[in-house]
Amino acid sequence: MTGAEGSADFAEAAQRGAAEVTATVIVDAPAERVFAALTAWERQSDWIPLTTVRVVEGDGGEGSLVEAVTALGPAVLRDEMRVVRVDAPYEVGVVHCGKLLRGPGVLRCTPMGRDRTQVVWHEWFHLPGGAAGRVAWPVLWPGSKFGLTQALKKFARLVEQGRLP
């Protein structure tokens, strides 16, 4: 790794944070197809609301830098992720390494037979804002989990309809 990713700052970002969120969905498609759809980074814009995703460095595989920008009116949240592990078609690991969103995440595809795949999206964010962030997280967590779950449900529909990848 080069630049910031080789630094102590990146190593700190790669550690699990206190804010943990997980969402799961079953997709009626084989794991290879589901994994390909998950790692078609720019296409995440089709199923993550208000978000534009692009690969800013690399080919989308291990070592690549992916940027997701979520905008709601004047509020903009920029999420930079380094792809740190690819085990196709089962798992992709990222480290959120931006200024606000930091921490590891993983997307797992588990084949279930009969061309069904369980997708688990798990994130461990560092809470910004010190004590205020720790107090706010229990209030923010249900919305985070709901939003992530809704996005994965839309993802599953698009894969099942053949619209992804």
Image: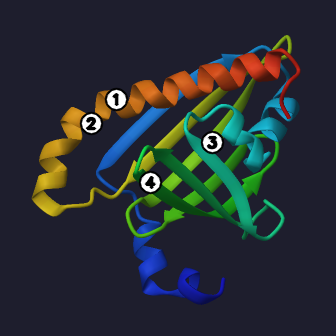
- Name the residue at 60% across, 26% down: 152
Amino acid type at circle 2 is Leu
Q: Earlier in the sequence, mark 1 or mark 3?
A: 3
How far apart are the two marked residues, 1 and 3, measured between alpha carbons?
19 Å
Image x and y of residue 9, in percent: 42, 81
- Name the residue at 26% across, 60% down: 128
Secondary-structure class at tag 4: strand
Q: Residues within 10 Å of mark 3 (few under 14, many from 20)?
A: many
Q: Earlier in the sequence, mark 4 or mark 1?
A: 4
Please report contact status of discs 2 and 3: CB closer than 8 Å, yes or no.
Answer: no
Amino acid type at circle 3 is Leu
Q: Is residue 3 above or below residue 124?
A: below
Please report contact status of discs 4 and 1: CB closer than 8 Å, yes or no.
Answer: no
Q: Is residue 115 above or below residue 143?
A: above
Disc 2 target residue:
140
Q: Earlier in the sequence, mark 4 or mark 2?
A: 4
Disc 1 target residue:
143
How far apart are the two marked residues, 3 and 4, measured between alpha carbons?
24 Å
Seen from the viewer's position, the closer of residues 118 and 2 is 2
Please report contact status of discs 2 and 1: CB closer than 8 Å, yes or no.
Answer: yes
How far apart are the two marked residues, 2 and 1, measured between alpha carbons?
6 Å
- Tell whether 142 sits left or right of 157: left
Secondary-structure class at tag 2: helix
- Tell whether 132 sits left or right of 154: left
